[in-house]
Amino acid sequence: MRTSSLIDLSRKIADEAHYGQFRRDGVTPYFNHISRVVNRLDSQNESDEVLAAAALHDTLEDSEITGDFLIKSGIPESVVSVVEILTHKKGESYFWYIDRIAENPIARKVKIADILDNLSGSPTERQIIKYARALLKLHGRG
């Protein structure tokens, strides 16, 4: 795993934001998911900005942390804007959310890695269909 001050800071914030959270199985720490998404993108030699956004991709959605807090903590506005795009807002249709992500190249890469990790668990048939449709949209085929 490549390190940089930005990646280290992003992982630290995400670790603290997701502390005590677990995956759907109730056993696996949520941060394991974050690490797998970051590692998948790191193995593709993505930039520090992409890896930072990957580390923080669920932070605004699943914690009390705000975009302003991220900026004040030293996360560049360019990364925070990607994390905001990756945040599924309450009441927003899932596929409008995916369409919004598809417009941003960094958000698209992170969301694809996120979905692939979600599919590697034990998704329901309904989730498999939803994620398959989302991947098609993110690849410009849906």
Image: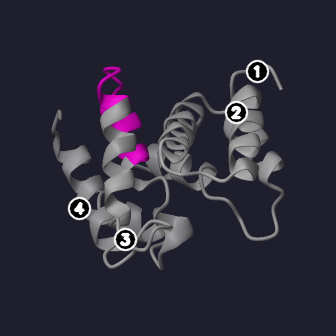
Q: Is residue 66 left or right of residue 137?
A: left
Count residues near mark 2 (Cα–Cα under 10 Å), then give few for <14, some for 14-19, many for 20+.
many
* Badge 1 or badge 3: first in the primary sequence: 3
Whole-angstrom CA distance, mark 4 to mark 3, is: 10 Å
Element type where label 1 sits in the image:
loop
Count residues near mark 3 (Cα–Cα under 10 Å), then give few for <14, some for 14-19, many for 20+.
some
Q: Is residue 112 above or below residue 97?
A: above
**What secondary structure prevails in the magenta region?**
helix
Q: Is residue 68 above or below residue 83?
A: below
Q: Nearer the viewer, residue 25 or 90?
A: 25
What's the magenta region? 41-54
| Mark 1, residue position | 140
Image quadrant in which the C terminus is located: top right
| Mark 2, residue position | 102
Whole-angstrom CA distance, mark 2 to mark 3, is: 25 Å
Question: Badges 2 and 1: C-beta atoms under 8 Å apart?
Answer: yes
Residue 102 at what x, y percent from top left? 70, 33
* Badge 4 or badge 1: first in the primary sequence: 4
User: Which label is found at residue 18?
Assistant: 3
The residue positioned 17% from the left and 46% from the top of the image is 5
Whole-angstrom CA distance, mark 4 to mark 1, is: 33 Å
